[in-house]
Image (cartoon, grey):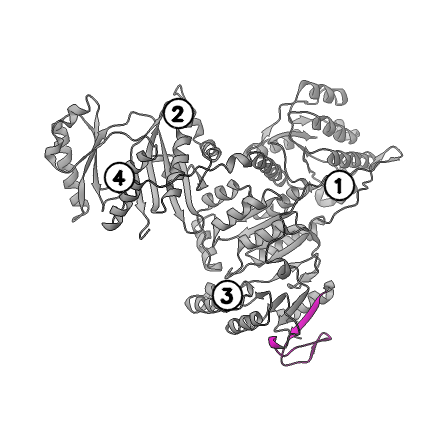
Amino acid sequence: MRSRKNALRASKGNKMVKVRRKRSVQHLPQQSFLHPILAPDSIAIIGASADPTKRGYKALVGLIKDGFEGRIYPINPKTDRILGIPTLPSVDALPEPVDLALICTPAATVPELVRQCGEKGVKGVVVLAAGFRESGEAGAQLEQALVEAARATGVRVIGPNTNGLFNLHKKVNLLGLTNVQPGGVGLISQSGNMLLALTLEAENYGQIGFSTYVGPGNQADVGFSDYLQYLGEEVNTEVAAFYVEGFNNGRQFIDTARAVTTVKPVVVYKSGTTAAGRQAAKSHTGSLAGSYAMTVDLLRQVGISVVHDSDEILPVAEGLSRMQKAAGKRVAILSDGGGQATIATDRLTEAGLELATLTEETQAALRAILLPHANTSNPVDVAGTSDTDPYVLAQCLEILERDPNVDQLFLVGMFGGYHLRFAEHLIGQEMRAAETIIELVARTAKPVVIHSLYTPVKPPPIRRLREEGIPVYASIEHAARTLAALGERGIYLKNRNKQTQVVTFEPDPEGLALFERANHEGRNLYEHEAKQLLQRHGVTVPEEILVRHPDELEGLSARFGQQPLAMKVVSRDILHKSDAGGVRLNLHSDASLRAAYDDILASCRNYQPGADIHGVLVSPMAPRGVEVIVGVVRDPAFGPVLMFGLGGIYVEVLEDVAFRAIPISRYDAEAMIDQIKGRKILAGVRGEAAVDRKALADLLVTVSGLVHAYPQISELDLNPVIAYPKGYAVVDARIICNPGV
């Protein structure tokens, strides 16, 4: 958003009041290599054309029409001039090392042209052509040739398979789009149609604009994390927005986001929420599309606002750019209708917000200006008071803003349309209310979010608010999602220092020896070895005995006293023991142990003939408790990721799990426990005692540190872990080794 003058008109009687709008947008120091490329002073168009249907023509027209003040070099060996500008016959004819070259020629020509650009000192190229990695093996080889040419000559590549870019503050428009206004939203989109949808939406909305847009395409060179770093540094960008189908290097993106989100908001819409959607994303971009739920959790872990619907991107981005953050999630709703107050309450609750508890002082002040039958508890319903006096809404907002229990204000209803709905003369009061709201927004740190039924009509009071950068939403849902994003960002920034205190430790020599032996034998860790590794790093595991011969069963029942025993097969070839009949429970005597041993071996050999059976594990059965799962995977895009949720059969049925990128802090561990819907079970239901949250958090932190210390771990699965009011029991442990590490 363009910076505004300090003077804001606010009428109070005949007095003009000047106020200063608070702005808190900061920027990272400029370090990105993309600055001269995305804000160029010189541009070459390779494949410039006089044909209006060609991109080489549209880009040239866009630069001329928008008033690009830098130097333009059209390259076309078949003509001397295009649109009055002299052309050059080749890249080699460039009189200087230009900042940016737009390549509009077919895919087969691109590697050589990239090489020529690099040798000529061009800083960056945009490759429009498709027909690379996304098209199959031959295209992948062509893309590799492009990359090799770029690396050999030092030129950076945007694309290929991109629709281009614009920088509206620099008047660089290589897409030929019209009526796109400069503003504070930096947009990176893997879909050209999504860009078109958002620019049309912004044009219709009228009060939001863009700083920079890039279509990243195949990201053969420049990737999402590079664009994020640039937008974090770019002074005209107040919020970075991304449409993502899949991350090639998700770990680098979230690492970059840790720095960027400290200074400005980042909004991400991730498509591919279903298996079919993820497959479509892969075929479209050639990128990896991982688990949607996992991706959302990892993005939120580093302070990114994730929206779930494409039509939320721009509303949430605008709200964050204007208001930046809230101190918390306590919202005061002010409404002129009970139905909409109820809807607003529902949407806020669903978004994880809470209704602020208004002080008695606040409610008394509201009662003093509202009709007797108005509701002064939250949500506040003015109950017809505003029908004859719309200015009362502004007065109520001022009262609510002073309440210490309120973090955000939400006005819902007909504001701006009273003069249309009831009486024309009410326009004066509505305009006076608008000016008072402008003053309020200027002096408070609490976000003021407004919804109006009349937003599509754009009456004068709403236009006036928008003139001063105050969003007015037509959708309660969009407004609620914006309030949620503001609250989430505020809480993230408040707790960020706690989150950065990650726990790591060094590998243990005996632990390394376990992996060395397993690697030598070409297998994963046996269950008892996995538990040994866990125990060596402070995880509590139950006592268990490895039995490799039936004679070793003699006397085991007496050793464990009256406790019922469990027996499980140990085999390099059988991962799912229950499926193979490799588990027996409630064993109480040596005879039952011997019978169980014989049954397990027979079942497993029938399930998988030739399986290498190392023995069986005998251990006391864990007492009843709450089953949870702790797991780790090495995601191809995000690296090691920790998972926590309800365990046993629940993890597959309910899919109620939380994810975090490793390594985690204790704050992350506690947040994972609080995130799952099953937290109510952990807190105790129907007279059951609550589980030991501290012990569970300790376990999560330790597992995170363990996986961080041992790159030999490819997957880890503790399922179930039985959680108790004091401590826990790791019933089953599985570690899949990373071959060759």
Q: Can residue 10 be seen in this view?
A: yes
Q: Residue furthest left?
A: 551
When the figure is inspected, residue 241 is found, relative to residue 324, above or below; the finding is below
The disc labelled 4 sits on which kind of residue?
A: Glu
**Quadrant of the rendered structure where residue 690 is?**
top left
416 horizontally vs 108: left or right: right
Query: Where is residue 397 drawn, in percent x and y?
Result: 72, 29
Q: State the residue position of label 1.
A: 465
Which amino acid type is marked by label 1? Leu
Q: What residue type is labelled 3?
A: Arg
Of marks 4 and 1, which one's residue comes earlier in the chain?
Answer: 1
Cα–Cα span, label 2 and label 1 = 51 Å
Q: Residues within 10 Å of mark 4 (few under 14, many from 20)?
A: some
Is disc 3 surrounded by few (<14), some (14 to 19) or many (20+) residues within 10 Å?
Answer: some
Q: In this view, does 650 lie above or below 298?
A: above
Q: Is mark 1 on a helix, strand or loop?
A: helix
> Can the viewer see residue 196 in this picture?
no
Q: Which of marks 3 and 1 is nearer the N terminus?
A: 3
Q: Name the residue under label 4.
A: 529
- Mark 4 → mark 2, Cα distance in angstroms: 27 Å
Region rendered in magenta: 70-92
The residue at which mark 2 appears reads as 691
Q: Which of marks 2 and 3 is in front?
A: 3
Asked if residue 545 lies left or right of residue 50, the reply is left
Q: Is residue 185 magenta?
A: no
| 255 up-or-down from 531: above or below | below
Disc 2/disc 3 C-alpha distance (Å): 55 Å
Q: What element carries label 4?
A: helix
Q: Name the residue under label 3.
A: 151
Q: Residue at x 76, y 37 (%)?
A: 438
